[in-house]
Image: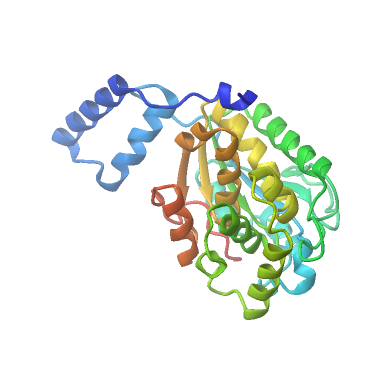
Amino acid sequence: MPLYESLISPTANPALEQGLRERMARHAAIAGGFGSLEGLALRLGLIQGTLTPRFRDPVLNLFAADHGLAVDGVGAHWPVNTEARAMLALQSRLPSAVMARLHGVQLQVVDCGMANNLPPHPKLLMRKVTHGTRNARLGSAMTVEHMQGCLRIGMELAQSHIGNMMAFAAIGQGAPEVGALLLARLDARRLDEVLPRHAQPVEHEVLQLALTRHREALEALDVLTTLGGLDIAVMVGAMLVGASKRQLLLIDGMAACAALRVAASIAPPVTDYAVFCRSNNDPGIDVALKGFQTTALLGSLLLRQNTA
Protein backbone atom coordinates (compact mmCIF):
# COMPACT_ATOMS: atom_id res chain seq x y z
CA MET A 1 0.00 0.00 0.00
CA PRO A 2 1.49 3.39 -0.94
CA LEU A 3 2.59 5.48 2.03
CA TYR A 4 0.07 8.28 1.72
CA GLU A 5 -2.79 5.92 0.99
CA SER A 6 -2.10 4.29 4.35
CA LEU A 7 -2.00 7.71 6.06
CA ILE A 8 -5.19 9.13 4.55
CA SER A 9 -8.22 7.98 6.51
CA PRO A 10 -11.72 8.02 4.98
CA THR A 11 -13.92 10.62 6.67
CA ALA A 12 -16.97 8.34 7.02
CA ASN A 13 -18.19 8.45 10.61
CA PRO A 14 -21.90 7.56 10.99
CA ALA A 15 -22.13 8.60 14.65
CA LEU A 16 -20.51 11.99 14.02
CA GLU A 17 -22.61 12.55 10.91
CA GLN A 18 -25.77 11.91 12.90
CA GLY A 19 -24.59 14.33 15.56
CA LEU A 20 -23.86 17.01 12.97
CA ARG A 21 -27.27 16.58 11.36
CA GLU A 22 -29.00 16.84 14.75
CA ARG A 23 -27.02 19.96 15.60
CA MET A 24 -27.94 21.59 12.28
CA ALA A 25 -31.59 20.63 12.82
CA ARG A 26 -31.58 22.32 16.24
CA HIS A 27 -30.01 25.42 14.69
CA ALA A 28 -32.60 25.42 11.90
CA ALA A 29 -35.45 25.28 14.41
CA ILE A 30 -34.16 28.45 16.07
CA ALA A 31 -32.48 30.56 13.41
CA GLY A 32 -33.25 28.93 10.06
CA GLY A 33 -31.62 26.24 7.99
CA PHE A 34 -28.27 26.11 6.21
CA GLY A 35 -29.86 25.68 2.79
CA SER A 36 -27.37 24.66 0.13
CA LEU A 37 -24.53 25.06 2.66
CA GLU A 38 -25.72 22.10 4.71
CA GLY A 39 -23.61 19.70 2.67
CA LEU A 40 -20.55 21.90 3.15
CA ALA A 41 -21.10 22.16 6.90
CA LEU A 42 -21.46 18.39 7.11
CA ARG A 43 -18.30 17.84 5.09
CA LEU A 44 -16.28 20.22 7.28
CA GLY A 45 -17.41 18.48 10.44
CA LEU A 46 -16.48 15.06 9.10
CA ILE A 47 -13.09 16.24 7.84
CA GLN A 48 -12.19 17.90 11.14
CA GLY A 49 -13.81 15.17 13.22
CA THR A 50 -15.81 17.56 15.36
CA LEU A 51 -19.30 18.97 15.89
CA THR A 52 -17.85 22.49 15.85
CA PRO A 53 -15.57 22.79 12.79
CA ARG A 54 -13.43 25.92 12.50
CA PHE A 55 -11.00 27.24 9.91
CA ARG A 56 -7.46 27.82 11.16
CA ASP A 57 -4.84 29.72 9.14
CA PRO A 58 -6.34 29.02 5.69
CA VAL A 59 -4.12 29.59 2.68
CA LEU A 60 -4.82 30.20 -0.99
CA ASN A 61 -2.08 28.66 -3.13
CA LEU A 62 -1.82 29.94 -6.70
CA PHE A 63 0.50 27.64 -8.62
CA ALA A 64 2.46 29.20 -11.49
CA ALA A 65 4.32 27.27 -14.18
CA ASP A 66 4.83 27.53 -17.91
CA HIS A 67 3.72 24.79 -20.29
CA GLY A 68 5.66 23.76 -23.37
CA LEU A 69 2.44 23.39 -25.37
CA ALA A 70 2.08 27.19 -25.24
CA VAL A 71 4.71 27.32 -27.99
CA ASP A 72 2.07 25.77 -30.28
CA GLY A 73 -0.54 28.32 -29.26
CA VAL A 74 -2.21 26.47 -26.36
CA GLY A 75 -3.57 29.13 -24.02
CA ALA A 76 -2.92 31.91 -26.55
CA HIS A 77 -6.39 33.36 -25.90
CA TRP A 78 -5.37 34.23 -22.33
CA PRO A 79 -5.17 38.03 -21.86
CA VAL A 80 -1.77 37.86 -20.12
CA ASN A 81 1.02 35.30 -19.79
CA THR A 82 2.04 33.37 -16.68
CA GLU A 83 4.61 35.89 -15.47
CA ALA A 84 2.21 38.82 -15.77
CA ARG A 85 -0.59 36.93 -14.04
CA ALA A 86 1.70 35.97 -11.16
CA MET A 87 2.72 39.61 -10.76
CA LEU A 88 -0.94 40.67 -10.71
CA ALA A 89 -1.59 38.17 -7.93
CA LEU A 90 1.37 39.40 -5.89
CA GLN A 91 0.15 42.99 -6.35
CA SER A 92 -3.35 41.99 -5.16
CA ARG A 93 -4.77 42.88 -8.56
CA LEU A 94 -6.43 39.53 -9.19
CA PRO A 95 -9.90 39.28 -7.65
CA SER A 96 -8.80 36.06 -5.94
CA ALA A 97 -6.02 37.93 -4.15
CA VAL A 98 -8.41 40.72 -3.13
CA MET A 99 -10.96 38.23 -1.80
CA ALA A 100 -8.25 36.34 0.08
CA ARG A 101 -7.21 39.56 1.82
CA LEU A 102 -10.79 40.52 2.66
CA HIS A 103 -11.50 37.10 4.18
CA GLY A 104 -8.26 36.84 6.11
CA VAL A 105 -6.87 34.08 3.92
CA GLN A 106 -3.12 33.95 3.42
CA LEU A 107 -2.05 34.17 -0.23
CA GLN A 108 0.92 32.31 -1.67
CA VAL A 109 2.07 32.33 -5.27
CA VAL A 110 4.10 29.18 -5.79
CA ASP A 111 6.60 29.30 -8.66
CA CYS A 112 6.76 25.63 -9.63
CA GLY A 113 8.38 26.24 -13.00
CA MET A 114 7.94 29.60 -14.67
CA ALA A 115 10.24 30.27 -17.60
CA ASN A 116 11.48 33.50 -15.98
CA ASN A 117 12.27 34.39 -12.40
CA LEU A 118 10.22 36.98 -10.56
CA PRO A 119 11.80 39.44 -8.13
CA PRO A 120 11.64 38.40 -4.47
CA HIS A 121 8.32 39.02 -2.75
CA PRO A 122 7.00 38.04 0.70
CA LYS A 123 4.09 36.14 -0.88
CA LEU A 124 6.19 34.37 -3.51
CA LEU A 125 7.49 30.87 -2.85
CA MET A 126 10.32 29.93 -5.17
CA ARG A 127 9.96 26.19 -5.68
CA LYS A 128 11.05 25.99 -9.31
CA VAL A 129 11.87 22.50 -10.50
CA THR A 130 12.80 23.58 -14.01
CA HIS A 131 11.99 26.47 -16.32
CA GLY A 132 8.73 25.14 -17.73
CA THR A 133 7.80 21.81 -19.27
CA ARG A 134 8.68 20.60 -22.74
CA ASN A 135 6.21 20.44 -25.60
CA ALA A 136 4.12 17.28 -25.06
CA ARG A 137 3.30 17.19 -28.78
CA LEU A 138 6.95 16.43 -29.47
CA GLY A 139 7.93 14.34 -26.46
CA SER A 140 7.41 13.81 -22.75
CA ALA A 141 6.48 17.04 -20.97
CA MET A 142 8.63 16.11 -17.97
CA THR A 143 11.25 13.63 -16.98
CA VAL A 144 10.40 11.16 -14.25
CA GLU A 145 12.90 12.99 -12.03
CA HIS A 146 11.13 16.32 -12.58
CA MET A 147 7.76 14.75 -11.82
CA GLN A 148 9.04 13.15 -8.63
CA GLY A 149 10.72 16.40 -7.62
CA CYS A 150 7.40 18.22 -8.02
CA LEU A 151 5.63 15.66 -5.85
CA ARG A 152 8.22 16.13 -3.11
CA ILE A 153 7.90 19.92 -3.27
CA GLY A 154 4.13 19.70 -2.96
CA MET A 155 4.43 17.31 -0.02
CA GLU A 156 6.86 19.65 1.74
CA LEU A 157 4.57 22.60 1.06
CA ALA A 158 1.60 20.90 2.71
CA GLN A 159 3.70 19.52 5.53
CA SER A 160 4.86 23.02 6.47
CA HIS A 161 1.33 24.45 6.42
CA ILE A 162 0.12 24.92 9.99
CA GLY A 163 -3.54 25.54 9.14
CA ASN A 164 -6.40 23.19 8.31
CA MET A 165 -7.45 24.47 4.86
CA MET A 166 -5.60 24.84 1.56
CA ALA A 167 -7.12 26.21 -1.63
CA PHE A 168 -5.66 25.14 -4.98
CA ALA A 169 -5.72 26.96 -8.32
CA ALA A 170 -3.30 27.20 -11.24
CA ILE A 171 -2.53 30.53 -12.91
CA GLY A 172 -0.11 29.44 -15.62
CA GLN A 173 -0.92 30.18 -19.26
CA GLY A 174 -2.42 27.01 -20.72
CA ALA A 175 -2.94 25.32 -17.32
CA PRO A 176 -6.70 24.71 -17.87
CA GLU A 177 -6.02 23.17 -21.28
CA VAL A 178 -3.29 20.90 -19.90
CA GLY A 179 -5.62 19.92 -17.04
CA ALA A 180 -8.26 19.04 -19.61
CA LEU A 181 -5.66 16.99 -21.47
CA LEU A 182 -4.96 14.89 -18.38
CA LEU A 183 -8.64 14.41 -17.56
CA ALA A 184 -9.44 13.40 -21.12
CA ARG A 185 -6.95 10.55 -20.82
CA LEU A 186 -7.56 9.56 -17.18
CA ASP A 187 -11.36 9.67 -17.42
CA ALA A 188 -11.51 8.35 -21.01
CA ARG A 189 -13.32 11.49 -22.17
CA ARG A 190 -13.38 13.15 -25.55
CA LEU A 191 -11.08 16.14 -25.49
CA ASP A 192 -13.80 18.52 -26.66
CA GLU A 193 -15.89 17.56 -23.61
CA VAL A 194 -13.43 19.04 -21.15
CA LEU A 195 -11.63 21.82 -23.03
CA PRO A 196 -12.36 25.40 -21.94
CA ARG A 197 -15.01 27.05 -24.07
CA HIS A 198 -12.54 29.65 -25.38
CA ALA A 199 -10.17 27.00 -26.77
CA GLN A 200 -9.50 27.51 -30.46
CA PRO A 201 -9.50 24.76 -33.12
CA VAL A 202 -5.71 24.93 -33.37
CA GLU A 203 -5.45 24.25 -29.63
CA HIS A 204 -7.73 21.24 -29.93
CA GLU A 205 -5.59 19.92 -32.79
CA VAL A 206 -2.33 20.36 -30.88
CA LEU A 207 -3.71 18.75 -27.74
CA GLN A 208 -5.15 15.84 -29.69
CA LEU A 209 -1.73 15.29 -31.28
CA ALA A 210 -0.20 15.17 -27.79
CA LEU A 211 -2.77 12.56 -26.71
CA THR A 212 -2.06 10.48 -29.79
CA ARG A 213 1.71 10.68 -29.36
CA HIS A 214 1.43 9.38 -25.79
CA ARG A 215 -1.36 6.89 -26.40
CA GLU A 216 0.47 4.24 -24.35
CA ALA A 217 0.55 6.41 -21.21
CA LEU A 218 -2.44 5.17 -19.20
CA GLU A 219 -1.28 4.93 -15.58
CA ALA A 220 -1.83 8.21 -13.72
CA LEU A 221 1.79 9.08 -12.95
CA ASP A 222 2.83 8.21 -16.51
CA VAL A 223 0.08 10.48 -17.83
CA LEU A 224 1.23 13.23 -15.47
CA THR A 225 4.83 12.87 -16.63
CA THR A 226 4.16 12.76 -20.36
CA LEU A 227 1.30 15.26 -20.64
CA GLY A 228 1.12 17.25 -17.44
CA GLY A 229 2.48 20.37 -15.91
CA LEU A 230 4.86 21.13 -13.11
CA ASP A 231 2.07 23.03 -11.35
CA ILE A 232 -0.27 20.05 -11.50
CA ALA A 233 2.40 17.69 -10.17
CA VAL A 234 3.17 19.98 -7.21
CA MET A 235 -0.54 20.14 -6.42
CA VAL A 236 -0.73 16.32 -6.41
CA GLY A 237 1.93 16.08 -3.71
CA ALA A 238 0.34 18.85 -1.64
CA MET A 239 -3.10 17.25 -1.82
CA LEU A 240 -1.80 13.89 -0.63
CA VAL A 241 -0.09 15.30 2.44
CA GLY A 242 -2.89 17.81 3.08
CA ALA A 243 -5.44 15.01 3.22
CA SER A 244 -3.16 12.94 5.46
CA LYS A 245 -3.22 15.92 7.89
CA ARG A 246 -7.05 16.10 7.63
CA GLN A 247 -6.96 19.49 5.93
CA LEU A 248 -9.81 20.73 3.77
CA LEU A 249 -8.75 20.85 0.10
CA LEU A 250 -10.60 23.56 -1.83
CA ILE A 251 -10.37 22.68 -5.53
CA ASP A 252 -10.87 25.30 -8.25
CA GLY A 253 -10.36 24.92 -11.97
CA MET A 254 -9.50 22.21 -14.46
CA ALA A 255 -5.82 21.96 -13.51
CA ALA A 256 -6.66 21.45 -9.83
CA CYS A 257 -9.30 18.85 -10.79
CA ALA A 258 -6.68 17.01 -12.82
CA ALA A 259 -4.27 17.09 -9.88
CA LEU A 260 -6.94 15.64 -7.59
CA ARG A 261 -7.68 12.94 -10.16
CA VAL A 262 -4.01 11.90 -10.15
CA ALA A 263 -3.83 12.07 -6.34
CA ALA A 264 -6.97 9.90 -6.08
CA SER A 265 -5.33 7.26 -8.27
CA ILE A 266 -2.58 7.04 -5.63
CA ALA A 267 -4.82 7.31 -2.55
CA PRO A 268 -8.57 7.17 -3.26
CA PRO A 269 -9.63 8.59 0.17
CA VAL A 270 -8.07 11.95 -0.77
CA THR A 271 -11.36 12.92 -2.42
CA ASP A 272 -13.10 12.78 0.98
CA TYR A 273 -11.20 15.97 1.86
CA ALA A 274 -12.00 17.87 -1.33
CA VAL A 275 -14.62 20.58 -1.71
CA PHE A 276 -15.09 22.01 -5.19
CA CYS A 277 -15.74 25.58 -6.20
CA ARG A 278 -15.78 27.08 -9.67
CA SER A 279 -14.65 30.42 -11.03
CA ASN A 280 -16.14 30.07 -14.51
CA ASN A 281 -19.04 28.48 -16.34
CA ASP A 282 -17.04 26.22 -18.63
CA PRO A 283 -19.07 23.07 -19.31
CA GLY A 284 -15.85 21.09 -19.06
CA ILE A 285 -15.85 21.75 -15.31
CA ASP A 286 -19.25 20.06 -15.09
CA VAL A 287 -17.79 17.02 -16.85
CA ALA A 288 -14.79 17.00 -14.53
CA LEU A 289 -17.00 17.20 -11.45
CA LYS A 290 -19.18 14.41 -12.80
CA GLY A 291 -16.07 12.24 -12.78
CA PHE A 292 -15.86 12.81 -9.04
CA GLN A 293 -19.63 12.23 -8.69
CA THR A 294 -20.10 15.65 -7.15
CA THR A 295 -20.99 19.26 -7.88
CA ALA A 296 -19.40 22.52 -6.88
CA LEU A 297 -20.49 23.39 -3.34
CA LEU A 298 -19.05 26.90 -3.65
CA GLY A 299 -19.28 29.37 -6.51
CA SER A 300 -16.80 32.12 -7.20
CA LEU A 301 -16.61 33.01 -3.51
CA LEU A 302 -12.85 33.15 -3.34
CA LEU A 303 -10.97 31.97 -6.37
CA ARG A 304 -12.19 33.93 -9.36
CA GLN A 305 -9.17 34.29 -11.63
CA ASN A 306 -10.15 37.08 -14.02
CA THR A 307 -7.76 40.00 -13.93
CA ALA A 308 -8.88 43.19 -12.25
Do we see residue 77 in this rendering? no
Residue 11 appears at what percent x and percent y? 42, 27
In the depicted structure, whether residue 71 falls above or below residue 285? below
Residue 171 appears at what percent x and percent y? 66, 57
Q: How many marks?
A: 0
Between 298 and 154, the one lying in front of the other is 154
The residue at the far bottom in this view is: 201
Residue 133 appears at what percent x and percent y? 80, 56
Q: Quadrant of the N terminus?
A: top right
Q: Quadrant of residue 107?
A: top right
Residue 183 appears at what percent x and percent y? 57, 55
Left or right? Give the position of 295 relative to 159: left
In the depicted structure, whether residue 160 falls above or below residue 139? above
Residue drawn where x is 78% and y is 55% of the image = 141
Left or right? Give the position of 147 relative to 266: right
In the depicted structure, whether residue 89 falls above or below residue 5? below
Between 307 and 101, the one lying in front of the other is 307
Between 263 and 15, the one lying in front of the other is 263
Residue drawn where x is 33% and y is 33% of the image = 42
Q: How is the image coloured?
A: rainbow
Residue drawn where x is 68% and y is 43% of the image = 221
Residue drawn where x is 26% and y is 41% of the image = 34
The residue at the far left in this view is: 29
Left or right? Give the position of 120 relative to 161: right
Do we see residue 96 in this rendering? yes
Between 27 and 246, the one lying in front of the other is 246
